[in-house]
């Protein structure tokens, strides 16, 4: 193990310093790799054993999953990798995989004669690092050491980069997404503190892996049997992953002898486990929906003073919780749906020191698309503009007069689960969340998928949900949410808006999909980013539009804006359903959003992350009438 | 004389193997198995194949008793058995047995009992053939080792 550790370390450093090309490998590696093979099929077991020995690995075989689990528990740190069959009579291979993943975080390679995609997918979803289809050849086994190295390596890298991630590391971000989202909940401390905590947790894990002598631990260990774990999981489910705190879980489980610390540590592992799973899923969805990539990154920022915000009463705790629940509860299946849709939005923000990024994608039914072409507005976003501090943003929302609704009868649509979820977390990544809302429009079959992305960081989540239409002004260091009424949409849209002021600049981006209904003059627009005169004023905004932006222009309504501010940033997001917004006085730093309030549903979600250090007052104003006049031809 | 015998037996073995490959009874995985046999485990192939026969007979019995049950409906269990059969058969290179298992599993996934029964018959037949041929092979092998064993002392 020490040998392996050296390799990993040397490789990690070489990776960090250069391009990670050469990994210094001792001559003998990977000889002596400690492999545990679990297979109820003794024929395969015998063959595998022989093959592995010929690879000069240190092999332990076992024909029962339960026995294997016992061995692993008793000899913690005595194995580097586990090879496990999928179908075993006493315990499903997936369950074993789950237990191993939860308890010792070893790389597990699944094996089965069943090579169907569904089976392999299931293995990957459960966290297998590889899936070998029987018959297994010796060449395949020769290479399994790579999973051990990779795992170690990733852990080291994670350690190094926690807080700021590489651009090309999207997969990783996705991986971490859930963990962050969940850990963020309780985190009311500063970024640094949280990061430190995280690192400590990692070290703890490593220590556990390398600790060959289980007796060294002083406290009596709780063995998380499958049953106990089930109890734990159901307790967590009952509470909701976001609200699950060790104390409450303990109460729900009601197991004598179990301490809060036991539960807390298991909860931490469970979250790590979820994180790994989500990574896999995220990766899959990315693979399938290549065009829908959301690539956002957050750089590291200054710290946020959340407590100040919380103290100011601006952030109701339950809002946070609700948001989290939403995040977790949303089925990933929607992503796929979104892909089928003709229009996809992609926004990627890149730039050094960029922090808040946001992307989302919306899907429109093509025929519903109006002729709104925001293209001209694009020019307005120029990164090199001087710093401008937006003092005031007004955002107001007003209710549309009823007659507006008459004009747009088709817009009576049902919104199923309009959700805007925003998590803002400083200093980490913004990852697309898997939450998506489907909208079904009554007359038009278009479905809208909204994909909200949230930032995750070790620290903070803000979510604002305001159900009432409020005009709120944002003052320095405060978060106020404006109300945005979302109404049913004919064509459907997904509009994430983001407001991200950077230290010296702020950018307001409202992603609106402008969907113009031809007869009705309904227009959706994307506000901020595309508003001429508005965006240019922000410094440090480097927005790169997704590759698809060109096509999107033609379609008008499809667009994502991502903004990355720099320094302390306030990532915020507005999800606004059809906006009819006049963008007047952009140069004045005002944005007018117009909403049709009289629509079927309202689910305004506004998220702000405000940096306490940077005071940026923001106001939202929505002037409904102006909008129509502006955008209507 | 004895040396010639050993050579002849080796040729017989090779001829039989070639036949089995030609018929698709065995595939290259069986050669992998043979390559795993060395000084440290001189009887590796026959050892593994005997384990395989032992396990497979159990599985076949289970499959039959499952399917013969009047109230049979546990296709899932059937699938699990078949999966194991597939895994072990493919691991020793029993290609045709494996292929029948695939068809068998397809029938069981469609809850096609008649198809399952047909596949079971076929599977038993294929298994039987494999069993006979491999035993024949091992027998020749044994004779060859004996013949060679007798010869070596003469040269020493």
Image (cartoon, coloured by chain):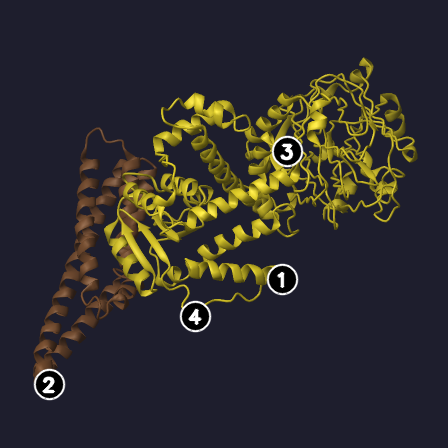
Chain colours: A yellow, B brown
Q: What is the distance, in whole Å, between disc 2 and disc 3 at their CAs?
A: 83 Å
Looking at the rendered structure, whether the residues under marks 2 and 4 are on a common chain is answered as: no
The x, y position of residue A571, in whole percent, is 73, 36
Query: The residue tagged with tag 4: helix, strand or loop?
Result: loop
Residue B49 sits in quarter: bottom left
Which sits in the foreground, A249 or A430?
Answer: A249
Give the CA separation, mark 2 to mark 4: 40 Å
Image height of A520 relative to A289, above or below: above
- Callout 2: few (<14), some (14-19), or many (20+) C-alpha neighbours within 10 Å? few
Which type of secondary structure does the marked residue at label 1 adopt?
Answer: helix
**Which tag, 3 or 4, sits closer to the chain's start?**
4
User: How would you rate the neighbour count of disc 1 (Cα within 10 Å): few for under 14, some for 14-19, many for 20 or more?
Assistant: few
- Specify whether disc 3 shares its chain with disc 4: yes
Give the CA distance from mark 3 to mark 1: 32 Å
Left or right, residue A110 beside residue A511? left
- Label placed on residue A27: 4
Can residue A107 be spotted in the picture?
Answer: no
Q: Mark 3 points at which residue?
A: A189
| Distance from the alpha carbon under mark 4 to that under mark 1 | 23 Å
For the residue carrying disc 3, how many other residues have a C-alpha within 10 Å: few (<14), some (14-19), or many (20+)?
some
Left or right? Give the position of A353 relative to A623: left
Discs 3 and 1 share one subunit = yes
| Disc 3 to disc 4: CB gap under 8 Å | no
- To which residue does mark 1 refer? A17
Foreground of the two, A183 or B20: A183
Badge 1: chain ID: A
Labels 4 and 1 in the same subunit:
yes
Label 4 is found on which chain of the structure? Answer: A
What chain is tagged by disc 3?
A
Badge nearest the viewer, 2 or 4: 4
Q: In which quarter of the image is the C terminus of chain A?
A: top right
Quarter of the image with the N terminus of chain A is bottom left
């Amino acid at each position: 193990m020490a040998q392996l550790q050296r390799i990993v370390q040397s490789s990690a450093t070489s990776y960090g310093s250069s391009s990670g090309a050469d990994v210094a490998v001792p001559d003998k590696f990977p000889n002596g790799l400690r492999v545990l093979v679990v297979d109820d099929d003794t024929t395969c077991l015998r063959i595998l054993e022989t093959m592995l020995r010929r690879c000069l690995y240190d092999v332990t075989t076992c024909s029962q999953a339960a026995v294997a689990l016992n061995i692993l528990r008793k000899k913690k740190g005595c194995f580097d990798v586990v090879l496990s069959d999928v179908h075993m009579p006493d315990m499903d291979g997936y369950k074993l995989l789950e237990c191993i993943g939860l308890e010792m975080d070893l790389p597990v390679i699944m094996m089965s004669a069943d090579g169907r995609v569904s089976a392999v997918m299931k293995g990957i979803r459960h966290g297998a690092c590889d899936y070998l289809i029987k018959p297994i050849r010796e060449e395949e086994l020769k290479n399994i050491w790579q999973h051990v190295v990779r795992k170690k390596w990733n852990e080291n890298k994670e350690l190094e980069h926690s807080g700021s991630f590489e651009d090309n590391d999207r997969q990783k971000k996705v991986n971490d997404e859930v963990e962050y989202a969940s850990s963020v909940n309780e985190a009311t401390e500063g970024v640094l503190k949280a990061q430190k905590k995280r690192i400590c947790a990692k070290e703890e894990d490593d220590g556990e892996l390398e600790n060959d002598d289980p007796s060294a631990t002083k406290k009596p260990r709780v063995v998380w049997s499958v049953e106990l774990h089930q109890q734990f999981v159901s307790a967590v489910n009952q509470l909701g992953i976001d609200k699950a705190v060790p104390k409450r879980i303990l109460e729900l489980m009601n197991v004598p002898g179990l301490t809060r610390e036991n539960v807390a540590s298991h909860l931490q592992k469970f979250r790590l486990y979820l994180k790994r799973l989500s990574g896999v899923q995220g990766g899959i969805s990315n693979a399938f929906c290549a065009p829908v990539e959301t690539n956002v990154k957050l750089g590291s920022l200054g710290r946020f003073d959340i407590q100040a915000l919380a103290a100011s009463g601006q952030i109701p705790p339950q809002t946070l919780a609700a948001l989290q629940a939403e995040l977790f509860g949303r089925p990933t299946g929607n992503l796929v749906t979104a892909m089928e849709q003709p229009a996809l939005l992609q926004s990627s923000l890149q730039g050094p020191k960029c922090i808040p990024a946001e992307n989302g994608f919306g899907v429109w039914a093509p025929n519903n698309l109006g002729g709104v072409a925001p293209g001209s507005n694009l020019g307005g976003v120029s990164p090199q503009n001087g710093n401008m501090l937006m003092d005031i943003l007004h955002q107001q929302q007003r209710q549309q007069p009823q007659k507006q609704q008459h004009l747009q009868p088709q817009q009576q649509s049902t919104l199923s689960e309009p959700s805007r979820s925003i998590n803002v977390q400083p200093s980490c990544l913004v990852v697309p969340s898997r939450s998506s809302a489907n909208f079904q429009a009554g007359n038009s079959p278009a479905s809208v998928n909204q994909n909200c992305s949230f930032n995750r960081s070790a620290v903070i989540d803000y979510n604002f949900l305001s159900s009432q239409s409020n005009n709120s002004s944002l003052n320095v260091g405060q978060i106020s949410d404006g109300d945005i009424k979302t109404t049913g949409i004919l064509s459907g849209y997904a509009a994430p808006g983001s407001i991200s002021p950077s230290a010296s600049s702020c950018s307001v981006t409202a992603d609106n999909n402008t969907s113009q209904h031809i007869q009705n003059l309904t227009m959706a627009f994307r506000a901020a980013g595309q508003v001429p005169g508005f965006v240019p004023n922000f410094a440090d905004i480097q927005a790169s539009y997704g590759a698809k932006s060109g096509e999107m222009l033609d379609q008008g309504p499809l667009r994502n804006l991502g903004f990355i501010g720099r320094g302390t940033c306030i990532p915020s997001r507005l999800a606004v359903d059809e906006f009819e917004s006049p963008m007047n006085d952009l140069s004045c730093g005002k944005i007018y959003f117009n909403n049709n309030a009289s629509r079927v549903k309202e689910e305004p979600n506004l998220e702000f992350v405000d940096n306490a250090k940077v005071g940026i007052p923001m106001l939202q104003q929505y002037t409904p009438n102006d909008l129509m006049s502006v955008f209507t031809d | 004389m004895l040396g010639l015998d050993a050579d002849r037996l080796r040729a017989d073995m090779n001829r039989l193997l070639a036949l089995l490959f030609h018929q698709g009874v065995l595939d290259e995985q069986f050669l992998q198995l043979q390559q795993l046999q060395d000084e440290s485990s001189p009887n590796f192939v026959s050892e593994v194949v005997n384990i395989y026969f032992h396990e497979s007979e159990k599985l076949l019995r289970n499959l039959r008793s499952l399917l013969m049950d009047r109230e049979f409906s546990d296709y899932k269990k059937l699938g699990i058995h078949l999966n194991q059969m597939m895994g072990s058969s493919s691991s020793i290179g029993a290609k045709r047995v494996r292929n029948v298992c695939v068809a068998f599993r397809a029938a069981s996934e469609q809850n096609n009992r008649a198809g399952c029964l047909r596949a079971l018959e076929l599977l038993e037949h294929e298994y039987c053939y494999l069993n006979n041929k491999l035993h024949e092979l091992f027998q020749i092998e044994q004779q060859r080792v004996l013949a060679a064993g007798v010869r070596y002392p003469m040269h020493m």
